[in-house]
Image (spheres, helix red, strand yellow):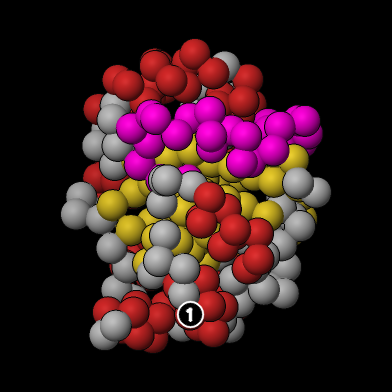
Amino acid sequence: MLPIPAIDIQSGKCVRLKMGNLDSAKIYYENPLEAAEFWIEKGTKRLHIVDLDGALEGSSINFSVISEIRNSFPDIEIQLGGGIRSFETIEGYINNKIDFLILGSAAIKNKDFFKEACASYPNRIILGLDVKQGFISTEAWTESSEIRAKDLIEEYSSLPINSIIYTDISKDGMLNGPNLEETKELADFSNIPIIASGGVRNLDDLIKLGETKKIYGAICGRALYEGTLDLREAINFFKEK
């Protein structure tokens, strides 16, 4: 189990949201670079970065901030999402040595593009599944679809996808625990490793998620920023397993 600190960027600042509500943003760092430095000092080897403005606009908005983090910490793995809807954007980030790119809305709205992206950059694309009441949401969680997570996983099961981030939107940023049942069920169903997202509040939640071996990691956001989860403790716990 890999705990992955989240850095969500809105208007150039590091924020956290509740259930994806862009108006609920709480600023934790004026400069996201400082957040990255803090979590790296705590021992993380990977960061989960989301361009919230980009997710809403459908293009890369905070490229300069993200590039600064990349250039400052060249040895850290970065998985990045938010507004990645074109090959120009993909190539810009790949050329800037971003390790993994998360495609969510594009995987629903432009399936040919998603398939071509996976084929062009094998094991570099992560499928982002943001689910509300059983159905996948898109466009920074502002639009709902009629597509279920399992159906999309089945459709893309033969592609060279790195992993799947499964987010229960109702849990995100609420500190009331992840959706263990559905996350584990999805992991058992999928032939692609799962990264859990949404609701993680403490080490016990990570331990429970880690009981399912196909759950590779868990994105940790508000729990880290509010101090209910100690990142160094979590990393050391799983390192010893």
Left or right of residue 82: residue 135: right
Q: Is residue 118 visible?
A: yes
Residue name at image x 45 percent, y 61 percent: 215
Location of the N terminus (image quadrant): bottom left
| Residue linked to disc 1 | 207
Left or right of residue 133: residue 188: left
Residue 134 percent location from the top left of the image: 76, 46
Judge by depth and name the residue closer to the eye, 21 or 155.
155
Residue 173 percent location from the top left of the image: 68, 63
Left or right of residue 161: residue 149: right
Location of the C terminus (image quadrant): bottom left
Residue name at image x 19 percent, y 54 percent: 75
- Compared with 94, 170 (above or below) is below
Secondary-structure class at tag 1: helix
Range covered by the magenta-colored residues: 137-164
- Compared with 121, 241 (above or below) is below
Judge by depth and name the residue closer to the eye, 70 or 180.
180
Mark 1 residue type? Ile
Judge by depth and name the residue closer to the eye, 195 or 44.
195
Residue name at image x 32 percent, y 21 percent: 119
Residue 55 percent location from the top left of the image: 60, 34
> Dot 1, how many residues are within 10 Å of its Cα: few (below 14), some (14-19), or many (20+)?
some
State yes or no: residue 14 in magenta: no
Residue 58 percent location from the top left of the image: 60, 24
Q: Is residue 217 visible?
A: no
